[in-house]
Amino acid sequence: MSKELAEGIVENGIVYRLGEHDLYYPELGMPEGSHYNIGKYGLMQCEYLKTDRKREYLRLLLDAKLNEHLHEIDEECHARVELFVEQMKTRSGITEELKSTEQMVWVGLMNNVRSA
């Protein structure tokens, strides 16, 4: 059930374009609106999927859901890190009052919290 186009063939909803050596290649791409910037944690998840969960990586990639999945992981991890930072600030006694009175002490304590 294929339909000839001016530049390629459409079969099962996939567009095939004529390439080198007279072979048809599928024109694969990400759907509109599904491109997200991926941060540190998304890249770490991508590396994990590539090395340890190859089947899951390929499934997400072929379903064009990999970028969206990595974006969700990245957002969730950033939210969790912020939650941990707030909890550690509370436990350590780091307050806005300390920030206004002794800025360098506050900066040092915040750097310790973030690096932990």
Image: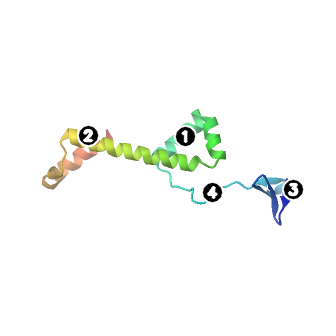
Q: Secondary structure at mark 2?
A: helix
Amino acid at the residue labelled 2: Met
Of mark 2 and mark 1, the one earlier in the sequence is 1
Circles 3, 2 touching at the beta carbon (< 8 Å): no
Vertical arrangement, residue 29 with respect to residue 109, above or below: below
Disc 2 crowd rating (10 Å Cα; few below 14, some 14-19, many 20+) is: some
Which is in the foreground here, disc 4 or disc 1? 4
Task: Please state if 60 lies on the left or on the right of 7 as rendered.
Answer: left
Q: Secondary structure at mark 1?
A: helix
Disc 3 crowd rating (10 Å Cα; few below 14, some 14-19, many 20+) is: few
Q: CA distance from mark 2 to mark 1?
A: 29 Å
Could you say which is closer to the camera, residue 101 or residue 60?
60
Q: Secondary structure at mark 4?
A: loop
Could you say which is closer to the camera, residue 31 or residue 12?
12
Circles 2, 1 touching at the beta carbon (< 8 Å): no
Q: Residue at x 40, y 47 (%)?
A: 78
Q: Residue at x 46, y 44 (%)?
A: 41
Amino acid at the residue labelled 4: Pro
**Residue sitting at the far left:** 101
Residue 84's disc is: none
Which is in the foreground here, disc 3 or disc 2? 2
Task: Please state if 8 lies on the left or on the right of 57 as rendered.
Answer: right
The residue at which mark 3 appears reads as 22
Percent coordinates x, y for residue 13 in the rendering: 75, 54
The residue at which mark 4 appears reads as 31
Vertical arrangement, residue 114 with respect to residue 19, above or below: above
Task: Please state if 24 lies on the left or on the right of 78 as rendered.
Answer: right
